[in-house]
Image (tube, rainbow, N blue to C red):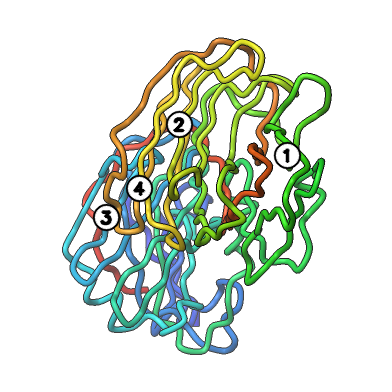
């Protein structure tokens, strides 16, 4: 039996367990008594509840936002890490979400599914980080949960969320995303979903990331840098040995085969370090170099914020603590590409480095949010 109720300029249609709200013939919202069942991977189950994050300023452009859920709070952050909204409603999420997080779905005010990527999901310790690509003209940002039968969503896709993304889940390097070009003994492999850069033997002599005669060792990203963007990656330097004393490996923004305009790396001259370089040119020297000691065999998050010709370089541990104060600078040259760069000197190979993932974010924040809340379908 279908019931139709007129409420001003809106029409409420009840058809079985489906409740639909229309305005002038356009569907505004659809709800299911007893749960929602039309997201992908339902597997015969239904979603019971969702985190509703109302939007106060409707975005006129798409952007990426991060939702963090701990044992108490649901928090929304922009790409820079600025808190946009927060509410102490996390207990309901953890009481219903699957232990593997496979029932997580993102959707807008019209129940259209959104692309998302789960950076972290720790059911035992109640910690989750979920990135969502929010389209322009969205009026809500919602996170569904509570379907114990659900399969993992096809919308959980970092390639669709970020401007550039690789978490090295394949057994081989994706040459659609990267173009390797190594010299001397430098090589790479995929190990446990990490890109591992290694130098298996002593080099014959000094060579650098870029030199005066040859294209240096690098894995060039098949991606055109944006004028405004944030590059982030998760990496660790392995424990040094007596055969790995002098070398650098990291991710940089490059002009050509001789000039690195912005470079962050781990360095193992007298111990593992993070090195910051701005305006590095093997011929003319560098405009700024700073470094800080770190722990080997430990992951860190490194990031470059590019806003036109201005840069900010940052590094964090996995708890979110700043490893080194922000370093800022201005561009000296035009940036043409992004690459994982490798260098060694003194006749020694460098200690291997592993990169867990790389992502590029659009440097934009067009939305303001209201207080998150939990709603039932």
Look at 40% across and 53% down and name the residue there.
Answer: 141
Residue 102 x %, y %: 51, 78
Label 3 environment density (alpha carbons within 10 Å; few <14, some 14–19, many ≥20): many
The residues tagged by marks 2 and 1 sit, at their Cα atoms, a distance apart of 18 Å
Q: Nearer the viewer, residue 131 or 17?
A: 131
- Secondary element at image label 2: strand
Residue 120 falls left or right of residue 83:
right
Q: Nearer the viewer, mark 3 or mark 4?
A: 4
Using the rendered view, name the quadrant where residue 279 is placed: top right
The residues tagged by marks 1 and 3 sit, at their Cα atoms, a distance apart of 38 Å
The residues tagged by marks 3 and 4 sit, at their Cα atoms, a distance apart of 19 Å
- Secondary element at image label 4: strand
Q: Quadrant of the C terminus?
A: bottom left
Query: Which residue has dot 4 on it?
Result: 316
The residues tagged by marks 1 and 4 sit, at their Cα atoms, a distance apart of 24 Å
Look at 39% across and 59% down and name the residue there.
Answer: 142
Q: Nearer the viewer, mark 3 or mark 2?
A: 2
Using the rendered view, name the quadrant where residue 355 is placed: bottom right
Q: Nearer the viewer, mark 1 or mark 3?
A: 1
Label 1 environment density (alpha carbons within 10 Å; few <14, some 14–19, many ≥20): many
Query: Which residue has dot 3 on it?
Result: 75
- Secondary element at image label 1: strand
Query: Which residue has dot 2 on it?
Result: 276
Query: Which residue has dot 1 on it?
Result: 218
Using the rendered view, name the quadrant where residue 174 is placed: bottom right
**Residue 193 drawn above or below residue 306:** below
**Residue 69 drawn above or below residue 201:** below
Look at 41% across and 31% down and name the residue there.
Answer: 313
Q: Nearer the viewer, residue 117 or 181?
A: 181
Label 2 environment density (alpha carbons within 10 Å; few <14, some 14–19, many ≥20): many
N-terminal of the pair, mark 1 or mark 3, is 3
């Amino acid at each position: 039996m279908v019931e139709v109720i007129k409420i001003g300029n809106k029409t409420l249609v009840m058809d079985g367990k489906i409740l639909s709200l229309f305005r002038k013939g356009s569907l505004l919202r659809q709800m299911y008594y007893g749960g929602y069942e039309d997201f992908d991977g339902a597997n015969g189950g239904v979603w019971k509840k969702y985190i509703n994050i109302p939007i106060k300023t409707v975005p006129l452009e798409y952007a990426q936002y991060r939702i963090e859920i701990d044992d108490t709070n649901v928090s929304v952050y922009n790409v820079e890490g600025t808190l946009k909204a927060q509410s102490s409603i996390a207990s309901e999420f953890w009481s219903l979400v699957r232990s593997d997080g496979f029932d997580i779905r993102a959707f807008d005010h019209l129940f259209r599914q959104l692309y998302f990527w789960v950076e972290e999901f720790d059911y035992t310790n109640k910690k989750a980080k979920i990135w969502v690509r929010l389209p322009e003209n969205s009026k809500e940002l919602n996170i569904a949960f509570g379907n114990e039968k659900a399969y993992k969503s096809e919308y959980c896709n970092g390639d669709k969320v970020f401007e550039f993304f690789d978490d090295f889940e394949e057994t081989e390097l994706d040459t659609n995303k990267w173009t390797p070009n190594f010299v001397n003994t430098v090589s790479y492999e995929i190990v446990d979903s990490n890109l591992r850069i290694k130098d298996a033997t002593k080099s014959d002599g000094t060579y650098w990331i870029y030199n005066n005669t040859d294209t240096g060792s690098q894995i060039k990203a098949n991606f055109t840098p944006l004028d405004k963007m944030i590059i982030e990656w998760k990496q660790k330097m392995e424990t040094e040995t007596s055969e790995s004393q002098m070398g650098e490996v990291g991710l940089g923004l490059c002009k050509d085969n001789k000039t690195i305009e912005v470079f962050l790396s781990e360095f193992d001259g007298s111990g593992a370090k993070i090195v910051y370089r701005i305006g590095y040119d093997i011929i003319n020297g560098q405009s700024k170099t700073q470094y800080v000691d770190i722990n080997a065999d430990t992951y860190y998050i490194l990031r470059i914020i590019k806003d036109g010709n201005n840069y900010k370089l940052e590094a964090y541990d996995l708890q979110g603590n700043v490893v080194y104060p922000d370093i800022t600078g201005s561009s000296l040259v035009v940036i043409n590409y992004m690459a994982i760069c490798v260098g060694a000197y003194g006749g020694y190979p460098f200690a291997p480095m592993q990169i867990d993932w790389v992502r590029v974010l659009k440097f934009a924040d067009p939305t303001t949010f209201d207080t998150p809340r939990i709603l039932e379908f």
